[in-house]
Image (tube, rainbow, N blue to C red):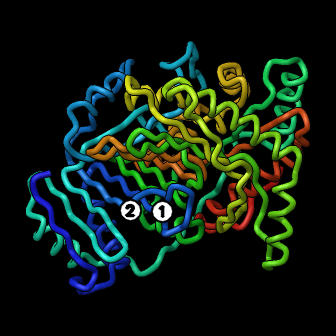
Amino acid sequence: MSNTLTIGAHELPCSLEDFRLKAMVWAQQFELVASYTSNGIPYPYDGFEDLLAVSNGSPIPLQGGDTFEKLQRQIDQQQGLLCGYLGYDLKNQIEKLSSDNPDHVAFPEVLFFEPEIYLSFKHNSLTIYSSSANVEDIKQQIISTSTPINFEPPIIQIQQRVKRDDYIGKVERIRDYIRDGEVYELNYCMEFFAEQVSIPSPLSLYLHLNTLSPTPFSGFLKYLDRYLLCASPERFLKKEERKLISQPIKGTIRRGSTPEEDKQLQHQLRHDEKELAENMMIVDLVRNDLRRSCATGTIKVEEMFGIYGFRQVSQMISTITGELRPESSISDALKGAFPMGSMTGAPKIRAMELIEELEVTTRGLYSGAFGYIKPNQDFDFNVVIRSLQYNATTGYLSFMVGSAITYDSVPEQEYEECLLKAKGILKALGLESLDRN
């Protein structure tokens, strides 16, 4: 980036928070927008950096196979920030798999761009980077941008792709597969959707969702007429110098209505044998994934079964780290661990085969990874969960939720867990609940 401007919070005519909001609104004039925030939530190895990136250029051409190798070639000549995502169906380039279920949102399976302008927000300052535009002009444009007063959710009729009885039947089939030794855990997901929806401001909906469900890996993506509104609590993979950090989530329980009830529920989660077993299985899977790119003897489980509270739910999170081998590249690290084991099951390849058989919607961007690669080649990617996807041209709105199924799973309880995970998104859409049929 050729032009930079660092501004102290005290130099602005508004608060840094208000400037950030103005910048988000200002950014909507661009065809490509990527925003990341941790919402200031404390998290092991921190959450997302607070970034906003825009471009009217074209995405980097990564389609048509060999995506990870093409991405690495781009990284090797990289001078600036890269922003984008890896869709779940890139699994088909890593293993001999396929994706034949319908895709109604129609995001590309991979998208990265190098921003023309990006803003980096710190605690008491921000820096504007630009490849060509005058950064002082950008600052003034943002300051003069007006922001919406409030958000009015559109009237939406949410439909359930898999009805309750069908869901329970699928979980029983998974238990049969587990009993037969095909897998010992499988992450089964279902879609909720609405058609012919008109959302005048997807950004306003995202901001509303982020207010209701602030998370450490929250993100907003605009690509022409398609939008990702992401309230993810889960990290896929982070790179700090040669260190890789993966933090799978397995284990969910509702928040309590009082501090005492909340503490009791978190204690219940921490000592739930089924949840502990699920978490342990995925920790082993992630350790195995990291072995593909990390040096022997460097992989460590730094935290096992950590309990973290978010606005809607408490989660059980483990932290696994490793050191990249000298000969391993960024694409080796991403490809070796993708997709996140918490969203597949174990053994991983067979679990993904069964996911394709059992689910009725292509996952696409859901359960992929959204993030950024910095100029120093450090990166951070979340797992795309607790997220809305919207195609403004077709009016199709979608979100998916799921849970890990083991032989000990009670289908009705797994169904209720899915509805619990959908709670934040439903609230953002102005809905308190769904038809449980």
Q: Secondary structure at mark 2?
A: strand
Q: Which residue is identified by label 1? A: 38
Residue 28, position in %: x, y?
30, 60
Residue 250, position in %: x, y?
72, 46
Q: Secondary structure at mark 1?
A: loop
With 217 as the anchor, is 353 left or right in this view? right
Res. 191 image quadrant: top right
Residue plotted at (76% across, 50% down): 251
Vertical relation: 239 (above or below) 359? below
Residue plotted at (37% across, 51% down): 222
Is residue 422 shown to the viewer in this render?
yes
In front of the other: 339 or 264? 264
Identity, as a three-letter code, of the amino acid under mark 1: Ser
Residue 272, position in %: x, y?
87, 51
Residues at badges 2 and 1 in contact (C-beta under 8 Å)?
yes
Q: Which residue is identified by label 2? A: 50
Calculate the distance from the C-alpha at mark 2 to the C-alpha at mark 1. 7 Å
Res. 64 image quadrant: top left
Identity, as a three-letter code, of the amino acid under mark 2: Asp
Instruction: Identify the disc placed on residue 423.
Output: none
